[in-house]
Amino acid sequence: MLRVGSKTACMACRNLVSTNMGVRFRVPLQKLHPLSRAIHHRYSSNTNPQRPPHRTAARYFTSMSRLPMRPPKPPPGSGGRGHQQQRNFWVARLAARLLKLRYILLGSAVGGGYTAKKTYEEWKDMLPDFSEYNWVIPDFVWELSEQIDFDKLAKALPEMEEIAKLLPDLDKIGENFTFLKSLLSSGVSLGSEVKGASGLHLLLETSGDPPLKAADSSAAATQDSSDKQYKKSSDKEKIDQLQEDLLRTQLKYQRMLERLEKENKELRKVVLQKDDKGIHQRKVKKSLIDLYSEVLDILSDYDSNYNTQDHLPRVVVVGDQSAGKTSVLEMIAQARIFPRGSGEMMTRSPVKVTLSEGPHHVAMFKDSGREFDLTKEEDLAALRHEIELRMRKSVKEGQTVSSETISLSVKGPGIQRMVLVDLPGVISTVTAGMASDTKETIFSISKAYMQNPNAIILCIQDGSVDAERSIVTDLVSQMDPQGKRTIFVLTKVDLAEKNLASPSRIQQIVEGKLFPMKALGYFAVVTGRGSSSESIDSIKDYEEDFFQNSRLLRDGMLKAHQVTTKNLSLAVSDCFWKMVRESVEQQADVFKASRFNLETEWKNNYPRLRELDRNELYEKAKNEILDEVISLSQVTPQLWESILQKKLWERVSTHVIENIYLPAAQTMDSGTFNTTVDIKLKQWTDKQLPHKALEVAWETLQEEFARFMAEYKGKDQDDIFDKLKEAVKDESIKRHKWNERAMDSLRVIQHNALEDRSITDKPQWDAAIQFMEETLQSRLKDTESVIRDMVGPDWKQRWFHWLNRTPDQHIRNETKNELERLLKLHDDHTAYLANDEVTTVRKNLEGRGVEVDPVLIKDTWHQLYRRHFLQNALSHCNLCKRGFYYYQRHFVDSELECNDVVLFWRIQRMLVITANTLRQQLTNTEVRRLEKNVKEVLDDFGEDMEKKSHLITGRRVQLAEDLKKVREIQEKLEAFIEALHKEK
């Protein structure tokens, strides 16, 4: 049945509603209830095609169901069917009342559940709150609970008997406290004599052990009270006994905690190892301290022009030389990672050490992929050697220390997360072998790191020497006068206890009463017995044994939280992260503002250029240079040969004319001419010609390479690359070595070309004559220019240009006129003047009042005869234009004997053949080798950041570099801040 309003509908009506709800029943119309049949007839003729009849009926039925319904009157003639319907309704009402029982049961169940939940919450509120101890078991241990063998872990925990042994004697402590109560009742106030610890002590109390704090405060209170108020021996003995009992209890708890920490360390190592295997994928991301260290690495290389200073926190380790600061750093890192020396300076540059937790104890440099296993002595020795090499490499010639930072990361189980910077030790005197400015350089490096307002200064003081000899304390007090970010560490306390006559002096140091310097906290540590071969574990054991037996701790001069490097590392780590959380967001805002300024400058000055940094610009320039080198292979062979032939003749023409042609032609004999020419050509070919040819080829290759680079410079090329291209060109040419093996084959080719005297056709003859004419005319022009310079301006220049001759030019002009008269008289005169001819010329000049030196006469004669000879040779050359027929028939005619034309043809043919040979070597070998050299030079320059910084310069480059750096710093800072918030 289906209840509609307060009445019960018939089955047919329910069928109709079910049809509307998606359940289709096939019921004959005759069996429907009269009301249903009426509804059906009412809406079966519905003309709205958007509304199906059964949905319209159902809506009408639903609207009606909100009103109380009466059974419809039976139609006339239905007989006793009305009595049957009334009985059916009575049965339905009875069944409905019986069904109310289920609601009673349902209500009882709901009420009982609510009562049970309320009772559970009341009991839960009565239980103690264990949320403060969630740090004992990390979150990811719960996620890996199924992989951990808890039976094995339970066996590793101590038994109850062992714990009972570690617990103190409660009866004895009760007696001691009864004694203390009696003292207090006598009017002595111990609390007023116990001095509060420093701010760092309060910081340690929030994360330390409550039993240890109670023991420390009770011991200090008892010691101070016994020293000031009570002098009786019996009371003093009881107080001493109480202190010893408390100290013994404290040490027992300390050993127990160390044992539990060691087991927890092993458990975390197992978990981290499983994370490395991929069980816990979210831990594969970089750790928080690694993200922070990357930001510091980028900042160390960033040189901003907008005064954006690096104020991010780091722990700066400063101290006098050999004070033990490197040993303290090694104890914190739990490995002997630094080079060691006996009294000499070992730390020559800042070393940034990023400490973080990891499954394996390893170290790695920022710029290297090698991991050093710190559990192996071989890797430790290699790491120390590498650090020493990097330090020495960073120090420039003539210097002792360097400001260049070496970045190192150390990971291992149980290592406190922080970033430390180990600085060179402060010195008081410059010794032999050091640069004169070493002391000032160390001071400037230390101040540069300490002036950061967010840097934590870890001031290391040697406890084995007199405190008055300390230099670093004055330096630290200058940089942090209020001591708000300074932690003072007293090293070598074991030696100090032996050497000092008054141990209270140590107490004055660690309480900040001896130095004017203020500090956030004071610590006393022992870093070994002074042997470089000691392991970290042995040093820890020695430190623990020393403080356990030391009267400094037993007599209350030192507090338990102020000793051991372990407590020191915990305190420094807490201070570091506190400082990071307080300052990192402010620094991110500073770099955000700097980024906005840089982007605004770029948009205003370079709106149409992409922001390409130095590396991207270098890649662009590299592609341009390689394209220019490839263009060399597109030079045509004809162009190569033309350039080579022209340059080779310019190089050898003087030797050919002066040393071969003129000496042979002035013999005036055909046989002597040919003999002289052959001898001189052979000597020239054997000694000079091949070398000259290779020099010409190499210079031609250089000039063409430079020409192509200069042509590309004007084709929409960036002028910012000019300096780089010039350097690449010079370095490539410097590295290129010509293949000397081609010289021997070139010598043979040139010798064979010069041996050939046969001119086969008239065009070759005419080409040789043209070549000879051009050469002789060029030499004649040069000779006339020399003569004009010797004798000065002629009469036209003197009249029209108001030029005058010098006395020397006047003498040379008179000498020239006298020698020209001699040449007219002897047209076939030899190349040299006889002594009597020189005397005759000199006397003739003296007769005209001109004093002249014989040397001047010979010099003038040389130029005049040279001009006379070249003029005759050109005339003879014109005659030889029609002499090819006689040459071909071997006719002997003195006027048409053209041996000089044959010589110039031999020279010309040698030039053509040599140019062809050099062109083949250039295109087949040398151009490819030059291209290879250019690629090597570009690769070498690409790896040298200093070289790129020198060759690609300008405000545009620097602005793009700053933008890249600032964006990178801001992004990494934001990623770090996000991870920092998640860790909270």
Image (cartoon, helix red, strand yellow):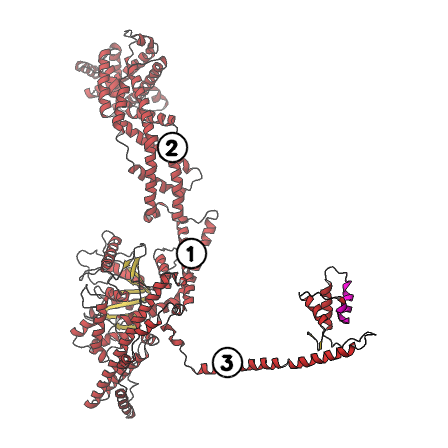
Describe the element under mark 1 as helix, strand or loop: helix
On whether residue 274 falls in the magenta region, the answer is no
Q: Quadrant of the N terminus?
A: bottom right
Q: Tell me the CA gap for discs 1 and 2.
A: 43 Å
The residue pinned by badge 2 equals 633
Q: Tell me the CA gap for discs 3 and 1.
A: 55 Å
Q: Tell me the CA gap for discs 3 and 2.
A: 91 Å
Mark 3, mark 1: which one is toward the viewer?
Answer: 3
Q: Residue at x 23, y 23 (%)?
A: 684
Given the current orientation, which residue lies at the most extreme front position?
Answer: 80
Q: Residues within 10 Å of mark 3 (few under 14, many from 20)?
A: few
Q: Residue 455: percent from the left, percent from the top?
A: 33, 65
Q: Quadrant of the C terminus?
A: bottom left
The residue pinned by badge 1 equals 967
Seen in the image, is 902 located left or right of residue 836?
right
Q: Tag 1: residue type?
A: Arg
The residue pinned by badge 3 equals 117
In the rendered structure, which segment of residues is drawn in magenta? 30-50
- Check whether the beta carbons of the residues at disc 3 and disc 1 lie within 8 A of each other: no
Rendered image quadrant of residue 58: bottom right
Could you say which is closer to the camera, residue 211 or residue 165? 165
Q: Residue 870: percent from the left, percent from the top?
A: 29, 16
Describe the element under mark 3 as helix, strand or loop: helix
Please give the label number shown on residue 528: none
Could you say which is closer to the camera, residue 76 or residue 747? 76
Q: Residues within 10 Å of mark 2 (few under 14, many from 20)?
A: some
